[in-house]
Amino acid sequence: MSQIEFDIEWTERASKKIERLLPKGTPIGLPPIECLPMEGDVLFLGSKEKKQPFVVIERQYHHESDNDWTIVLILDLPEA
């Protein structure tokens, strides 16, 4: 059985924005793997009253071993 882990990385611009929106260590819920965002998709993150858009600029797949994978979503801010 495969083990798939998810990770989110941020561009420098997005990192500064998310630090203001969510306290460090706040879990971010992602949709199931069948619906995982693709490059160009927009995710709205933050508390209910402070949601802000973040764009998936890259989706990477890292093969760790035979059945272990990590999928990394790299998020940036949308262009103004």
Image (cartoon, grey):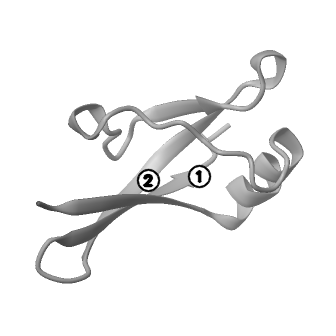
* Extreme residue toward the front, this view: 1
Front-lying residue, 9 or 11 = 9
* Extreme residue toward the top, this view: 49
Report whether 23 appears left or right of 18.
Answer: right
**Which secondary structure lies at badge 2?**
strand
Q: Residues within 10 Å of mark 1 (few under 14, many from 20)?
A: many
Q: Which residue is mark 1?
A: 76
Are the two marked residues, 2 and 1, in contact with CB atoms closer than 8 angstroms?
Answer: yes
Front-lying residue, 34 or 15 = 34
Using the rendered view, name the quadrant where residue 64 is placed: bottom left
Position in image of residue 59 (x %, y %) = 34, 58
Report whether 55 appears left or right of 13.
Answer: left
Quarter the C terminus occupies: top right
Above or below for 29 versus 39: above
Position in image of residue 79 (x %, y %) = 61, 42
**Which secondary structure lies at badge 1?**
strand
Name the residue at 39% across, 32% down: 31
Above or below for 58 versus 52: below
Report whether 58 appears left or right of 69.
Answer: right
Give the residue type that dot 1 points to: Asp
Above or below for 80 versus 75: above
Position in image of residue 62 (x %, y %) = 28, 75
C-alpha separation, residue under disc 2 versus residue under disc 1: 6 Å
Above or below for 17 versus 74: above
